[in-house]
């Protein structure tokens, strides 16, 4: 009887209100972004560097780089600013000392941009480390007023979403729901 119940109600049902981005929508958009990024970077350098920001970008990045046809070196680094569903206001960066970005064209791949504090901190850090150019690609850009000064522009945006907490396709609530192949609005 228990097996039957599990089948009827998927494990995420009680925590995902509505589905915002379906698998098909995501696939189509990620392919477009891959084409656009390939075209842009093939014009400026024989090779470029992607830095995936862990953990949230891991699924987006895995799909995106398979649609990129230009040579690229891929690194990962960590950034954390959220606890649960709220921004803590301070950004913690880790593993940026392991990156070889000096004189390189760098594309930072993020899961989602909210206040832009994380982007700003990453931008400053990569500047200090001597990157030749730094641009940003975000799977989702939230429709929030970016109040901070000096927040860099996101050149490649997958989707613009309302200011709600979302999960799935790498996005989490305390490390849960990253595995969902779609994006849904989180329901506490
Ligand atoms: P800021 O405010 O620095 O926030 O632009 C960016 C980081 O905050 C996390 N974040 C979310 N994570 N669902 C998530 O799973 C959300 O709706 C959400 N909003 C912000 C995320 O880690 C992002 O890198
Ligand atoms: Mg997160």
Image: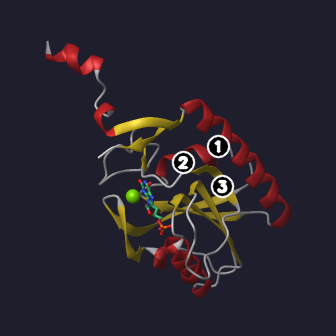
Horizontal and vertical percent position of residue 115: 51, 69
- Dot 1 beta carbon under 8 Å from ligand 1: no
Q: Identify the residue at the far bottom of this view.
A: 128
Horizontal and vertical percent position of residue 174: 29, 54
**Is 52 left, or right, of 2 in this rendering?**
right
Q: Which residue is mark 2?
A: 60
Do residues under tags 1 and 3 come within 8 Å of each other at their CB atoms?
Answer: no
Horizontal and vertical percent position of residue 104: 69, 74
Which is more N-terminal, label 2 or label 3?
A: 2
Residue 20 vs 127, above or below: the answer is above
For the residue labelled by badge 3, is the local secondary structure a helix, a strand or a loop?
strand
Residue 161 vs 101, above or below: the answer is above
Q: Which residue is mark 1?
A: 30
Residue 34 vs 146, above or below: the answer is above
Which is more N-terminal, label 3 or label 1?
A: 1
Q: Which residue is mark 3?
A: 157
Q: Residues within 10 Å of mark 1 (few under 14, many from 20)?
A: many
**Is 23 left, or right, of 33 in this rendering?**
left
Do residues under tags 3 and 2 come within 8 Å of each other at their CB atoms?
Answer: no
For the residue labelled by badge 1, is the local secondary structure a helix, a strand or a loop?
helix
For marks 1 and 2, give the CA distance: 8 Å
């Amino acid at each position: 009887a228990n097996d039957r119940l599990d089948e009827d109600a998927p494990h995420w049902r009680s925590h995902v209100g509505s589905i915002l981005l379906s698998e098909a929508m995501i696939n189509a958009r990620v392919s477009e972004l891959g084409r656009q990024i390939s075209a842009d970077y093939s014009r400026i350098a024989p090779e470029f560097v992607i830095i995936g920001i862990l953990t949230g970008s891991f699924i987006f990045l895995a799909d995106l780089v398979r649609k990129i046809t230009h040579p690229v070196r891929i690194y990962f680094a960590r950034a954390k600013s959220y606890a649960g569903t709220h921004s803590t206001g301070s950004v913690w960066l880790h593993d940026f000392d392991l990156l070889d970005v000096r004189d390189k064209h760098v594309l930072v791949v993020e899961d989602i941009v909210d206040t832009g504090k994380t982007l700003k901190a990453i931008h400053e850090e990569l500047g200090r480390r001597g990157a030749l150019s730094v641009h940003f690609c975000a799977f989702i850009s939230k429709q929030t007023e970016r109040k901070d000064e000096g927040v860099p522009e996101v050149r490649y945006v997958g989707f613009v979403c309302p200011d709600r907490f979302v999960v799935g396709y790498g996005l989490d609530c305390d490390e849960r729901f990253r595995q969902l192949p779609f994006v849904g609005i989180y329901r506490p």
